[in-house]
């Protein structure tokens, strides 16, 4: 009986779904997210960078946990590409920092990394966009949104392959 059952199982057509979760080429995985650190030669304004990230299915990076912040900061430091735009801004209301123009979630006070004396809208300039400031060990700074900087995009991991594979077993 066992031999008959095994024969039926192995001679049947088995259908298995194959799925792989990961990041698109050029993106770096961390937990359930993918991060894109722009190249040195693709600096953009904060608004252009925000659009570029959205076109790739993501947004400028926002931080929900100290471990995520620490990981991104460490990775950016190793690249040595200068400052990076982040998703934070106070465009709608001066001093009220939120993540990205679309979701508007407030910047969590328990997960911030402002450089000393920041944000400050230096000399009355309209510094409404957040960046990781290379000169200050990649701590946060507010700066003018039109300036050209590197940027960091974030998105969820993606299903990079999904399909049905038919396997035939003959015993």
Image: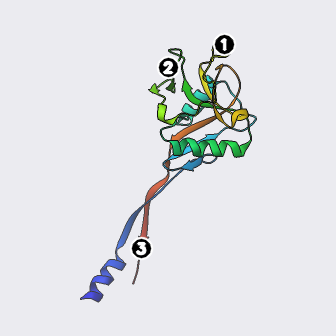
Check disc 1 and report its element: helix, strand or loop.
loop
In the picture provided, is 12 more to the left or to the right than 48? left
Instruction: Please report the residue visible at 58 percent of the width from the left and 44 percent of the height from the top.
Output: 70
Which quarter shows the C terminus? bottom left
Instruction: Please report the residue visible at 55 percent of the width from the left and 45 percent of the height from the top.
Output: 34
Q: Position of residue 100 (x, y in %)?
A: 51, 27
Distance CA(mark 2)–CA(mark 1): 16 Å
Q: Position of residue 14 (x, y in %)?
A: 37, 69
In the picture provided, is 142 more to the left or to the right than 110? right
Instruction: Please report the residue visible at 27 percent of the width from the left and 87 percent of the height from the top.
Output: 2
Q: Where is 38 relative to 26, above or below?
A: above
Q: Earlier in the sequence, mark 3 or mark 1?
A: 1
Residue sitting nearer the eye, 70 or 91:
70
- Quarter of the view holding residue 35: top right
Residue linked to disc 3? 168
Residue linked to disc 1? 125
Distance CA(mark 3)–CA(mark 1): 68 Å
Instruction: Please report the residue visible at 74 percent of the width from the left and 41 percent of the height from the top.
Output: 80
Q: Position of residue 85 (x, y in %)?
A: 63, 30
Check disc 3 and report its element: helix, strand or loop.
strand
Residue linked to disc 2? 96
Neighbourhood count class around disc 2 (C-alpha, 10 Å): few under 14, some 14–19, many 20 upward: few
């Amino acid at each position: 009986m066992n031999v008959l059952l095994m024969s039926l199982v192995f001679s049947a057509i088995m259908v298995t779904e194959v799925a792989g979760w990961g990041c698109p080429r050029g993106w770096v995985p961390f937990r359930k997210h993918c991060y894109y650190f722009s190249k040195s030669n693709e600096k953009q304004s904060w608004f252009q960078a925000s659009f570029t990230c959205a076109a790739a299915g993501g947004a400028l990076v926002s931080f929900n946990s100290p471990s995520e912040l620490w990981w991104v900061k460490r990775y950016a430091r190793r690249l040595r590409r200068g400052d990076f735009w982040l998703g934070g801004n106070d465009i709608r209301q001066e001093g009220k920092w939120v993540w990205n123009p679309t979701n508007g979630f407030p910047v969590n006070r328990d997960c911030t990394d402002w450089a000393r004396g920041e944000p400050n809208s230096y000399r009355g300039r309209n510094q409404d966009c957040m960046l990781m400031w290379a000169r200050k060990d990649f701590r946060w700074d507010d700066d003018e949104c039109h300036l050209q900087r590197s940027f960091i995009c974030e998105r969820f991991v993606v299903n990079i392959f999904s399909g049905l594979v038919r396997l035939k077993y003959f015993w």
